[in-house]
Amino acid sequence: MSVKEETLLLVAPVTWAGIWTAPIAAQAPELKVFVHDRDEYDPAAIDYVLSFRPPPGLLKTLPNIRAVFSLGAGVDGFLADPEYPRQVPLVRFVHESLAREMAHYAVLHALLFHRRQRNFDAAQTDHAWRQSFPPRKTEDTHIGIFGMGEIGCVIAAAFRDLGFPVTGWSRTRKDLSGVRSYAGEAERAEFLAGTDILVCVLPLTDDTRGILNKDLFAQLPRGAYLINIARGGHQVPEDIISAIDGGQLEGATLDVFDPEPLPPNSPLWSHPKITVTPHVAALTDPFVMAKSAVDGIRLIQSGKPLINVVDFERGY
Ligand code: NDP
Ligand code: OXD
């Protein structure tokens, strides 16, 4: 009797397909890989799916899938599909390399603000020797991490190790050395009141959508700085602009937007106190991602439980 060949369907832009299929083929040559919108395949023959934002309704047309692997840490692109077949486990991408890149990005942009680098850039443009920007004191600059998960904890530790006072906010309390933990709605206002640089790494859920709004900014100390590296759906762009123009926020770094790409006519592009980057805070390493999906498939094949499975009730 022949053993059924297992199949994986990649649902991603066809032009980038090779980035993901090559490392999968290298690590699991026995797996037959199809690319959605490029290859013909039998929906009933698909065992596993790899994607980031599958077209809504597609996954329910694959009756025999055993697991879905996310190309990224955030899974809002899957949960936006009201027809996601919830009996199928959704596995998110968790890896130290991703968390480390996110920490580098957060530290880079916090230090650009903290060290007033934008003022020196402007002075250089003017060929002007201006030393007169008052330095901020590291021990008085409180970093608040909004979301103390796999990535938030690594970011918190990076700032702590640079000598900043660091706090974190999450649903449940954390125990990370040198980082004060605030938990739940009841402790959010106190956390915000003590945060000079807010780094958002929350997942996008029904509870967190639109959370970066004028009411929240009003709870931060005047002149605070915002770094959003989570999802565009967390932020209300008009509220960010008016908080900056009114002096409540001193500036913002935004890596994520809704929609993406950020439309060319968005006022965020040209605001002098807003730094825009195109969703690049951390890019998933294709080889590491492929290994993580292949490891997950091996767990299923050997009857062991999957790890990093999304809780559909929590939404992350
Ligand atoms: P995790 O699921 O590991 O962590 C999420 C954290 O948010 C947890 O600490 C969780 O609390 C907390 N949280 C969730 N909901 C609430 C709530 N309602 N109130 C308070 N705290 C809440 O996610 P990751 O750290 O792996 O990733 C975070 C996000 O980063 C992703 O969802 C993605 O959107 C974004 N991301 C962006 C990238 C980019 O390039 N810009 C790259 C990678 C990720 P608790 O611990 O108590 O459950
Ligand atoms: C992710 C992302 O969620 O890259 O991993 O945004």
Image (cartoon, rainbow, N blue to C red):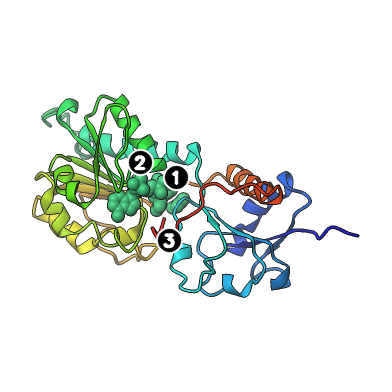
Q: Is residue 282 visible?
A: yes
Looking at the rendered structure, the secondary structure element under dot 2 is helix
Ligand 1 contact, mark 1 (Cβ < 8 Å): yes
Indicate the amino acid at tag 3: Asp
Residue under circle 2?
Answer: 152
State how far apart marks 2 and 1 are (Cα).
13 Å
Q: Residue at x 58, y 73 (%)?
A: 60
Indicate the amino acid at tag 2: Gly
Residue 48 in the figure: left or right of residue 313: right
Residue under circle 1?
Answer: 282
Q: Residue at x 14, y 48 (%)?
A: 189
Question: Where's residue 50, x and y in %?
Answer: 60, 58
Callout 3 crowding tier (Cα within 10 Å): few <14, some 14–19, many ≥20: some
Tag of residue 76: 3
- Furthest toward the right, the residue is 1
Q: Nearer the viewer, mark 2 or mark 1?
A: 2
Ligand 1 contact, mark 3 (Cβ < 8 Å): yes
State how far apart marks 3 and 2 are (Cα).
17 Å
